[in-house]
């Protein structure tokens, strides 16, 4: 079964990566802890650094500058450190794509969680079924006994 949520997340990620790469920036989505963040900083790749030197007079980001979008509520909080100079239309576009990326991630997260819950339920049913043994048959049906769980 194919889920469009995965394709949507991937498409948004590629769109954002391409947009940032054109501006010699890179971004990272951090989902390992709360709150989820998306960090943008200058690309430290040698080719990108050489391009940035050539374009030094229009420098978008200082060497250690970064923008962090923090997702705690409805709209992400934006934290800026170092020298950043991004045109407002570009910043708005980045912010909109980052918000969509965050929402797409949440869809995938809950989809994966639901799959894990369903798998755990199937495993629990199988385990219980394996532990039930018929002990006495009567005309109305089978009486079963549940073996105690084995401790390891």
Image (cartoon, helix red, strand yellow):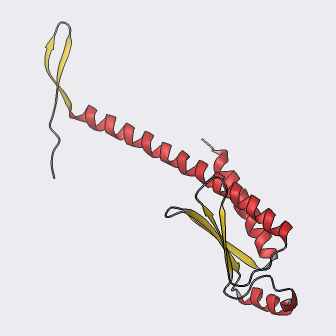
Query: Furthest-top residue in view?
Result: 139
Q: Splitting the image into 4 quarters, where does residue 133 fall?
A: top left
Q: Looking at the picture, tell me which residue is in the foreground, 74 or 25.
A: 74
Q: Position of residue 38 (x, y in %)?
A: 63, 67
User: Residue 31 location in percent, x, y?
Assistant: 54, 63
Q: Quadrant of residue 105?
A: bottom right
Considering depth in this image, is 88 or 52 the residue closer to the camera? 88
Residue visible at 76% across and 85% down in the picture: 48
Q: Is residue 86 left or right of residue 64?
A: right
Asked whether 116 or 76 is in front, the reply is 76
Say if 121 sits above or below 143 in the image.
Answer: below
Residue at the image position 87 percent from the left and 90 percent from the top: 57
Q: Position of residue 113 (x, y in %)?
A: 48, 47
51, 132: nearer the viewer: 51
Residue at position x 68%, y 83% in the image: 65
Q: For the image shown, how many numbered marks are present on the structure?
A: 0
The extreme left residue here reads 136
- Whether 102 is drawn above or below 144: the answer is below
* In this picture, residue 39 sits left or right of residue 118: right
Left or right: 40 as drawn, with respect to 94? left
On screen, residue 3 above or below 99: above
Quadrant into which the N terminus falls: top right
Q: Is residue 22 left or right of residue 80?
A: right
Residue 93, quarter of picture:
bottom right
Residue 22, image x, y percentages: 82, 75
Q: Is residue 2 above or below residue 31?
A: above
Which residue is painted at 68% across and 57% down in the image? Answer: 101
């Amino acid at each position: 079964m194919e889920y469009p949520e995965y394709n949507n997340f991937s498409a948004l990620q590629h769109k954002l990566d391409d947009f940032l790469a054109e501006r010699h920036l890179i971004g990272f989505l951090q989902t390992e802890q709360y709150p989820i963040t998306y960090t943008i900083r200058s690309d430290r790749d040698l080719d990108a650094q050489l391009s940035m030197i050539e374009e030094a007079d229009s420098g978008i980001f200082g060497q250690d500058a970064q923008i962090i979008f923090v997702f705690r509520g409805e709209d992400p909080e934006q934290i800026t450190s170092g020298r950043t100079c991004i045109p407002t239309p570009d910043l708005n576009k980045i912010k909109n794509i980052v918000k969509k990326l965050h929402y797409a991630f949440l869809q995938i997260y809950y989809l994966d969680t639901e799959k894990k819950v369903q798998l755990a339920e199937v495993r629990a049913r199988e385990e219980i079924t394996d532990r039930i043994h018929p002990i006495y048959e009567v005309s109305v049906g089978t009486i079963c006994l549940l073996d105690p769980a084995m401790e390891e």
